[in-house]
Image: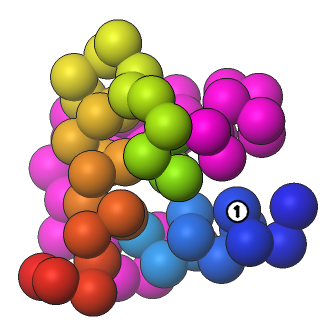
Amino acid sequence: MRELDQLLGWWLDARYERAGTEAKAAFAELLEQPDPELWHWLQGHGAPSDVRWRAVIDEIRTRDHV
């Protein structure tokens, strides 16, 4: 899904380099989740149970406000 790639690519380009080890690991784990689940979370129709994943998702969702 192109939209999903763009959203996740934003975090990779804008945040990955400065992110800590835990955030990088969380991002890598997120990439292993099914696309429909990721899309659901990124659209704000739910949230992952893992707080580390949630932090990355929240950062992506609020990227224009940071």
The answer to whether residue 50 is left or right of residue 34 is: left
- Secondary structure category for the residue under label 1: helix
Nearest the viewer among 47 and 54 is 47
User: Residue at the location (56% across, 70% down)?
Assistant: 7
Percent coordinates x, y for residue 13 in the rendering: 45, 81
- Name the one closer to the observer, 6 or 43: 43
- Residue 31 visible at all: yes
- Percent from the top left, x then y, of residue 28? 52, 39
Which quadrant of the rendered structure holds the C terminus?
A: bottom left
Give above or below for 7 relative to 42.
Answer: below
From the viewer's perspective, is residue 58 above or below residue 14?
above
Residue 5 position within the rendered picture, expressed as x and y whole percent measured from the top left: 72, 67
Q: Is 35 left or right of 24, judged from the image as shown? A: right
Q: Residue at x 29, y 77 (%)?
A: 63
Residue, disc 1: 4
Magenta range is: 12-40
Q: Position of residue 56 (x, y in %)?
A: 31, 48
Question: Is residue 19 part of the magenta span, yes or no?
Answer: yes
> Is 46 inside the magenta-drawn segment?
no
What residue sits 52% from the left and 29% below the top? 29
Quadrant of image for the N terminus: bottom right
| Up/down of 39 relative to 15, above or below | above
Q: Amino acid at mark 1?
A: Leu
